[in-house]
Image (spheres, grey):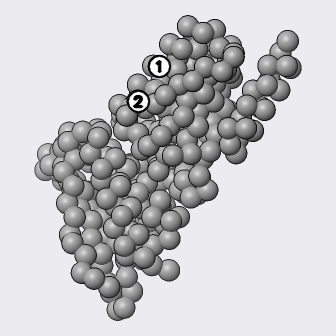
């Protein structure tokens, strides 16, 4: 299940549309890094609304993506973590420290725009 | 309550992890668990199945409904014939990992579920059994 990545100006939006296997997550990581470099993007949104579960592997991979993209000088926002998924993550002991999160796509975009304005 | 089938999911690759947790969620919902509890159960299955793929290569996840003195619940078993666990005490400690992972797998699963048991023998394999009860 490949995750579609849309380019919107200087931002990229990756919308996860179904449950992802570990291989799918690693594929998303590769695709996002490639596209950030190719388009010289300065912001990335990963929409996880459709993710059924955020286990330790998914959390670690999303954190890695954020860190890699940060090294390129771009920001990442994870949006749409479902309430029950957030509950399970906390019970499991997972945190998203150092990773920006927002309620939905709209708030994620607002966050990136704010960061972009602050930098210029 | 209709009789629920004993479900066994063979775990050989990361795609099977997704299949196991989806079947677990369906079973949990059929038993009557809330969406939140079904997500906790699916997350626990994901961690247990990943341990099988990572450490043993293959194994199986078993799931079934369980009833004890009019109390319904779900029981999950994750079994493999892998290398076994050298120190169960170590793997139940947060942050302990031999794979470079986050080391939250088993202690995390223990926190997600109501009951947790683990049997392991070096060179023989591992069986993790967990339960959650309807509240």
Q: Is residue B102 visible?
A: no
Q: In the drawing, what numbered circle is on residue B80?
A: none
Residue at 24% of width from left, 39% of height from top? B13
Q: Which residue occupies the foreground of this view, B112 or A22?
A: A22
Residue at 30% of width from left, 79% of height from top? B66
Q: In the drawing, what numbered circle is on residue A31?
A: 1
Q: Which badge, 2 or 1, comes first in the chain's sequence?
A: 2
Determine the secondary structure under disc 1: helix
Q: Is residue A105 left or right of residue A16?
A: right
Residue at 37% of width from left, 82% of height from top? B72
Residue at the bottom extreme, as displayed:
B69
Look at the numbered discs 2 and 1 and tell me whether their residues touch, using CB distance below 8 Å.
Answer: yes
Instruction: Find residue A62 and report its horizontal and vertical position in percent.
Output: 53, 32
Residue at 29% of width from left, 41% of height from top? B15
Q: Which residue occupies the foreground of this view, B23 or B96?
A: B23
In the rendered image, the vertical position of residue B70 relative to residue A73, given as above or below: below
Q: Is residue A54 left or right of residue B78?
A: right
Q: Chain of mark 2?
A: A
In the rendered image, the vertical position of residue B52 relative to residue B30, given as above or below: above
> Residue A87 sits in which quadrant?
bottom right
Instruction: Find residue A70 and report its horizontal and vertical position in percent.
Output: 64, 19
Mark 1 Cα-neighbour bin, 10 Å: few <14, some 14–19, many ≥20:
some
**Distance Cα–Cα, label 2 vs label 1:** 10 Å
Instruction: Find residue A80 and report its horizontal and vertical position in percent.
Output: 62, 45
Q: Chain of mark 1?
A: A
Mark 2 Cα-neighbour bin, 10 Å: few <14, some 14–19, many ≥20:
some
Looking at the figure, which quarter contains the N terminus of chain A?
top left
In the rendered image, the vertical position of residue A101 relative to residue B126, given as above or below: above
Q: Is residue A30 visible?
A: yes
Looking at the figure, which quarter contains the C terminus of chain A?
top right
Q: Which residue is mark 2?
A: A2
Q: Which residue occupies the foreground of this view, B67 or B2?
A: B2
């Amino acid at each position: 299940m490949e995750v579609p990545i849309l380019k919107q100006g200087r931002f990229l939006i990756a919308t996860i549309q179904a449950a992802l296997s570990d291989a799918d997550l690693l594929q998303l990581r590769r695709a996002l890094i490639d596209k950030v470099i190719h388009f010289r993007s300065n912001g990335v949104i990963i929409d996880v609304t459709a993710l059924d579960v955020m286990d330790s592997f998914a959390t670690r991979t999303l954190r890695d993506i954020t860190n890699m993209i940060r090294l390129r000088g771009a920001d990442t926002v994870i949006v749409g973590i479902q309430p029950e998924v957030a509950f399970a993550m906390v019970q499991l002991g997972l945190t998203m420290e150092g990773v920006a999160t927002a309620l939905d796509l709209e708030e994620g975009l607002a966050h990136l725009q704010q960061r972009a304005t602050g930098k210029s | 309550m209709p009789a629920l089938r004993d479900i066994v999911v063979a775990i050989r690759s990361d795609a099977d992890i997704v299949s196991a947790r989806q079947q677990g969620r369906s079973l949990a919902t059929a038993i009557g668990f809330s969406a939140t509890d079904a997500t906790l159960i699916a997350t626990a299955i994901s961690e247990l199945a990943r341990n099988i793929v990572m450490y043993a290569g293959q194994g199986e996840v078993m799931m079934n409904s369980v009833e004890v003195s009019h109390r319904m619940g779900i029981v999950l078993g994750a079994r493999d014939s892998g290398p076994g666990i050298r120190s169960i005490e170590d793997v139940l400690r947060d942050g302990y990992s031999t794979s470079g992972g986050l080391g939250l797998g088993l202690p995390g699963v223990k926190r997600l579920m109501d009951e947790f048991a683990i049997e392991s023998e070096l060179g023989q394999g591992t069986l993790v059994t967990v339960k959650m009860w309807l509240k």
